[in-house]
Amino acid sequence: MNTLEGLPILDHYNRLLATGKTKNALDVMYEYFNFFNEEGPKEHLWYMLVLALKNDNEAIDARHRSNMIFFYECSLAFFKAAYTLCENQNKPEICVADEKRK
């Protein structure tokens, strides 16, 4: 099961995986920020970090668990989109880390 089922971000992500086109990468990124706006990712990452570091005695309610999974799956699509845009740039200095791996 994927929490993105039925949402445009999943369609864009699947097209991005199939084609690697910049347009699909941008579509994923637009959808991502429609869900999370500018501050949302920071808040979700902080919450996930705090929960990961907390004692196992505290239960995570279903809504927060679902939100974390949804954020994770959207982030996978977003990171693929960002990487694709980086790869499609004509400026090699943008992807310095990738060049170091080669």
Image (cartoon, helix red, strand yellow):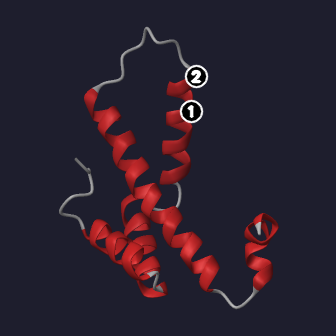
Kind of residue sitting beneath label 2:
Leu
* Mark 2–mark 1 CB contact (< 8 Å): yes
Work out which quarter of the rendered image holds the C terminus and state it: bottom right
- Indicate the quadrant where residue 27 lies: bottom left
Helix or strand or loop: what does disc 2 sit on?
helix
Quick one: 2 or 62, which is closer to the camera? 2
Residue marked by disc 2: 53
* Vertical comparison of 60 with 45: above or below: above
Distance from the alpha carbon under mark 2 to that under mark 1 = 6 Å
Quick one: 62 or 24, which is closer to the camera? 24
Quick one: 87 or 102, which is closer to the camera? 102
Instruction: Answer with left or right where residue 64 lies relative to residue 57.
Output: left
Which residue is drawn at the image coordinates 43% and 48% (left, top)?
Answer: 72
Q: Hey, which residue is sitting farthest left in the picture?
A: 6
- Indicate the quadrant where residue 85 lies: bottom right
Residue 21 in picture, x, y percent from top left:
45, 85
Instruction: Answer with left or right where residue 20 lies relative to residue 102.
Output: left
Residue 68 in picture, x, y percent from top left:
39, 40
Q: Alpha-carbon neighbours of circle 2 within 10 Å: few (<14), some, or many (≥20)?
A: few
Kind of residue sitting beneath label 1:
Leu
Which residue is drawn at the image coordinates 58% and 70% (left, top)?
Answer: 83
* Vertical comparison of 85 with 1: above or below: below
Helix or strand or loop: what does disc 1 sit on?
helix
Instruction: Answer with left or right where residue 3 lies relative to residue 54.
Output: left
Q: Which mark is residue 49?
A: 1
